[in-house]
Image: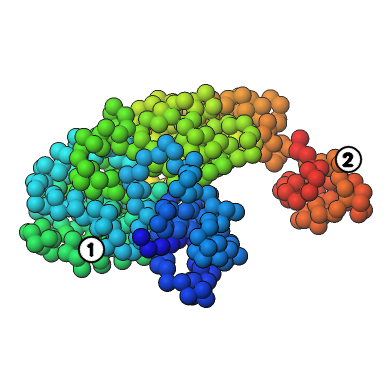
Amino acid sequence: MSTKILLGYASCGIAAGADAVEGALRTGLKEHDLDIEVRRVGCVGMCHREPLMEIHDDRGAFVYADLEEEDVEKIISSHLLKNVPYQDKLISSPERSYDYFHGQKKIVLQNSGVIDPESIDEYMAQGGYEALKKALTEMSPGDVIEEIKASKLRGRGGAGFPTGLKWQFAADAPGDKKYVICNADEGDPGAFMDRSILEGDPHAVLEGMILGAYAIGADEAYIYCRAEYPLALKRLDIGIEQAMDKGFLGDNICGTDFSFHIHVKEGAGAFVCGEETALMHSIEGERGMPRPRPPFPAQKGLFGKPTNINNVETWANIPWIIRNGAQEYASVGSEKSGGTKVFALAGKIKRGGLVEVPIGTPLREIIYGIGGGIDGDVEFKAVQLGGPSGGCLPAEYLDTPVDYETLTEAGAIMGSGGMIVMDVGDCMVNVARYFLDFTQQESCGKCTFCRVGTKRMLEILDRFTQGKGSKEDIDMLKELASHIKAYSLCGLGQTAPNPVLTTLRYFDHEYVSHIEEQTCPAGVCRELITFSITDSCVGCTRCARECPTSAIKGEPKSVHVIDQEQCIKCGACQDVCPVNAVEVE
């Protein structure tokens, strides 16, 4: 085979310096007169090792990671000119694999990092649009729905509602005009699954939507994608144009009577627009606010017409199911949920990035097996699952299988797939406050219990972080949470108290410490901690120069002192101290 080079070119790679690496690569190849194909691909999942370069030659695939411009010439000189892999940045080869992929099962991400996402021909070379051809020539719309039902695919956007049943509702709804929507309004802190799928394999999402439209009888669709995802939007636009040129979109698809058109709608970043009824209002040009259900979107949705909404990951599963069969898909996963789930593994983790595992995989295998454990080898404390709508699970839940029912019973949710790992340096009271602050700011304000209730809860948590909380405040938090969950209109409000409730359930001792001892065990809450400099200070003056309030005094080469009245507890001194002489009490 001829040599080819794949360069990771998703948002994570670009942010890490892929542009500079690509520039050096193309310049180096030209200088050495090497006629080697260089292709941009999406994220393979190893966000923690970007920029990435993969060289394919007669021996197989060689992956180079953590690249900088100066590494490129060394790789060219050694690997491409002498046929000797450059060992300093080599992490995977035909002789050794990278542990990050052990335990993963790639269905949704099978093409991400493998094909050029801006090439429909490369997607088709991997079996792309074969599912659509199969459905249009061998299956009725009802057959497609039954296949999705048999696959046990559940919505990957949060609630986990059976996808085939949802499609059936839309198909059975009377009306000569129906819509399909792709919810790409990914707003959870720490979540980047949908962005990476759209950047790495947009045609899988498009093909899934076309199949869904055929199944329910829709002829028009919208992809609602946040404007903060410019690369995803660019590749979607390219993909739609390419699919229309090939006859997979537009009028009389593949020579049949089936016609289908897709539009892209850019969202302005409102978290509430991830809720399906608020999303539809936004597409219609209205303010993004939820409405009561019933009627459900399947009966009366976009512009008052029957509508089916699924998120990016759900749609990306559809072509694989139709191409390989429902039974093959259902054989992966748990008894009640077929297939895999993509997670954005972030936080205090050694190997952060995208992981795709069979549903039912234990948390321990994801965090320690795939993620490599806690950064710095410190003690694991908790993992936040499901974003602001989810919950924090402690160490005793590490062997919990990640499936919808088990996580819900534990107080968390699967959600869209955010998984934020925390260690003993995290204060759970502060974590609960962070997520509640997010949902409180993102509340659309329509419901009194969400608008006002989350504000009152946030005020109570603020008192805790300042050492001013009381035991009565804990009771009030629980009472407010109960009312907010019961009387909020949409999922944002109904789930907003979850991070607070799970931290109260599993880390109540930290709340007690903030109340009774007026201390933050993790040393995070500023009002409850004190910075001091020990005798190990070498007098380098870095802390004094970095202090924004000039609170640190001392002569060069002598122990410095912090003026507690001037100190704002920003932690800058601790960050720059070369000998770890700054302590937090």
Badge 1: how crowded within 10 Å, few (<14), some, or many (20+)?
A: some
CA–CA distance in space, label 2 to label 1: 68 Å
The residue that appears at 36% across and 40% down in the rendered structure is: 105
Q: How many marks?
A: 2
Name which quarter of the figure residue 120 lies in.
Answer: bottom left
The residue that appears at 33% across and 41% down in the rendered structure is: 156
- 521 to 319, vertically: above or below: above
Residue underneath mark 1: 243
In the foreground, 254 or 65: 65
Q: Could you tell me residue 183's position as x and y percent? A: 32, 51
315 sits to left or right of 72: left
- 34 to 578, vertically: above or below: below
The answer to whether residue 372 is seen in the rendering is yes
Q: Could you tell me the amino acid type at mark 1?
A: Ala
Q: In the structure shown, which secondary structural element does the residue marked by tag 2 occupy? A: loop
Residue underneath mark 2: 535
